[in-house]
Image (spheres, rainbow, N blue to C red):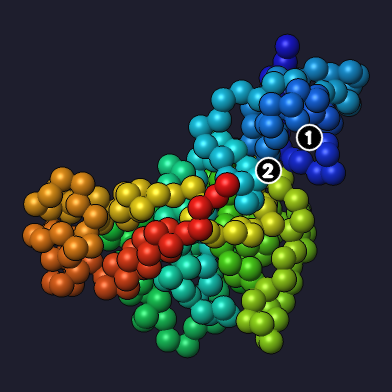
Amino acid sequence: MPEGKIVKALAGFYYVLADDGSITQCRGRGVFRKNKITPLVGDIVKFQAENAQEGYVLEVLDRKNELTRPPIANIDQAILVFSAVEPDFSTALLDRFLTLIESKHITPVICITKMDLLTDDRKVKEYASYYENIGYTVLMTSNKDPEGVATIYPYLADKVSVIAGQSGVGKSSLLNVLRPDLDLKTAEISMHLGRGKHTTRHVELIEVEKGYVADTPGFSSLEFLELEVEDVKDCFLEFVRLSEGCKFRGCTHLKEPKCAVKEAVENGEIALYRYEHYMNFVEEITNRKPRY
């Protein structure tokens, strides 16, 4: 039975890319509904071709990870796209994305766009330097500078990447630079709401630089529905590195004495805004309504 990767899902159809480069439009067999399994873009599946163009997905192989909003599986890395301005760069939103991505064991790459629109870039570069120092790759680009955007190419090869970030930051514009033949629809920022309109309606893997990039509708939910309080500290890289110096094993870095993380905050080694975001996320999960 042939295997392939789902590269597009639209209107109940799954488009499966086989090893020979052919794409088969498939429907899912009823067994998926019975077992409550929904095939996702990025899934490796076994399928049966009824003819040269049509067939059925019969089995979804084990996933290494998955996201539900947007629905995609087997992701190697997330390109987190944040604008320097319009909308303004938000460390709170970036840390929320990083926490969600880290919890799924997906490698984040931070891409700051619209650098050309800044009159004073010192603050944004200060933020970028901090995230680089704690271990993240940070790329600063302008969609008007194809050479600058080209710095992303080496990170895309042989990987499945998802482009994520707030609406209106230039995700579709970025993909248009990476693949000019796509001519993806983009939308202007709503001056009233301060955010862009969603311009992508489905999930699709697009081949770029011998890898695949997912064009997605964006994260429609950024709630920590699958995270527990004790998981959050492991999603902050600098906390993990310093936690070995805490007096108590399993320190939550909140009320315990002789906490290396709190000491690092006090001496400026850890940015205060990062620690405040951590406390906010823990409080949010603590007060989360139980699911039934």
Residue 190 to residue 102: above or below? below
Residue 158 horizontal/vertical position (percent) = 54, 36
**Viewer-nearest of discs 1 and 2:** 1
Give the labeled residue for mark 1: 14
Q: Amino acid at mark 1?
A: Tyr
Residue 159 horizontal/vertical position (percent) = 53, 39
Do the numbered discs 1 and 2 sit on residues whose CB atoms are within 8 Å? no
Name the secondary structure under disc 2: strand
> Which label belongs to residue 205?
2
Q: Nearer the viewer, residue 203 or 130?
A: 203
**Image quadrant where residue 96 sits:** bottom left
Q: Tag count in the figure?
A: 2
The 10 Å Cα crowd at callout 2, few under 14, some 14 to 19, many 20 or more, is: many
Residue 171 horizontal/vertical position (percent) = 63, 62
For this view, does 117 lie left or right of residue 13?
A: left
> Which residue does the image show at 83% across and 30% down from the upper left?
27
> Which residue does the image show at 41% across and 81% down from the upper left?
121
For marks 1 and 2, the one nearer the N-term is 1
